Image (cartoon, rainbow, N blue to C red):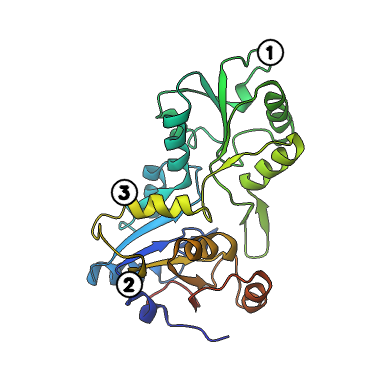
Amino acid sequence: MILDNFKSVVSKYDVIFFDAFGVLKTYNGLIPGIENTFAYLRETNKDFYVVTNDASRSPEQLAESYVKLGINDVTPDRIISSGMLAREYLDYKVRDGVVAYLGTDNSAHYIGTSGLKTLSIRELDLNTVGDVNALVFLDDEGFDWNTDLTKTLNLLRKRNIPVIVANTDKTYPASKSRLSIAVGALAKMIEDTIGRQFIRFGKPDPQMFIFAYQHIKNYPNVDKRSILMVGDTLQTDILGGNKFGLDTALVLTGNTQAEDAEVRIRATGIIPTYICVSAVVE
């Protein structure tokens, strides 16, 4: 497997889309040396955005998490979250009533600003659900998996309402050797059990990349050939970027490790334009 130099790769593009977890940071902090990448982007006047399936916190809170780690470059306007697409859908399609959600109070930011009343699934009373007009899967925390997933199942038996999955990730690394179940997997389990089709926002859906493309500021008329998608996961970052017509760079600091990258690429048929050790400019 031939590895590409990330600095040489990124120098060819005007706009960079970064995935967050596994690319810029991991479970124990920033990817070592990633501050050099942001310095290089500043020096060369390249535009960048963090395109993430993380709907657990608002863009302001996500940006603040980078500040606490010593990175000031990732401002809220540079964060494109799948939760933003969920909010846009609710604004257009759900006019009134209550939106129930699975997630933390912080994750409810994405639906609380749409003018609708929000209600955590943990506070839902199944005897009074007549005004619940939508359900959103936001995060895998903030509710009891046993009690509240069962409540979710029975809510959908009672109400024929749209169900939005604002984070399609099925797993995330909890440590170097351990994965945790993400909200996308919980949504898939409920979907299969109830026999319904849910609405999904997030990579690899092209709508996520369309949304990010529309938010590019410094190069508003940029051609897709001048945009690079950098990610650690073949099935979301790389597949989504490829489908949208972008060049893609797979980094080996997250979900895809160096020892099995080639096997996974062959097995899935998802082929990145470049493969780099990391997103660090050296």
Residue type marked 2: Tyr
Dot 3 or dot 2: first in sequence order is 2
Q: What residue is shown with label 1?
A: 127
Instruction: Report the mark closest to the observer, 1 or 2.
Output: 2
- Residue 103 rendering spot, x and y as whole percentages: 57, 36
Check disc 3 and report the residue beneath it.
77
Can residue 40 be seen here? The reply is: yes
Q: Quadrant of the N terminus?
A: bottom right
Mark sitting on residue 70: none
Instruction: Name which quarter of the figure residue 269 lies in.
Output: bottom right
167 lies left or right of 24: right
Q: Nearer the viewer, residue 21 or 190?
A: 190
Left or right of residue 138: residue 262 = right
- Disc on res. 13: 2
Q: Is residue 108 above or below residue 79?
A: above
What is the spatial separation of the Cα atoms under label 1 and label 2, in whole angstroms? 55 Å
State the residue at coordinates (56%, 73%). Answer: 271
Q: Tell me which label, 3 or 1, sits earlier in the chain.
A: 3
Left or right of 139 in this view: 225: left
User: Closer to the camera, 210 or 170?
Assistant: 210
**Residue depicted at x 51% and y 83%:** 3
Badge 3 crowding class, 10 Å Cα cut-off, few under 14, some 14 to 19, many 20 or more, is some
Query: Is residue 28 something that shows in the picture?
Result: no
Residue at point 32%, 51% (across, down): 215
Figure quadrant of residue 113: top left
- Looking at the image, tell me whether mark 1 or mark 2 is earlier in sequence order: 2
Mark 3 and mark 1: Cα distance apart in space: 41 Å
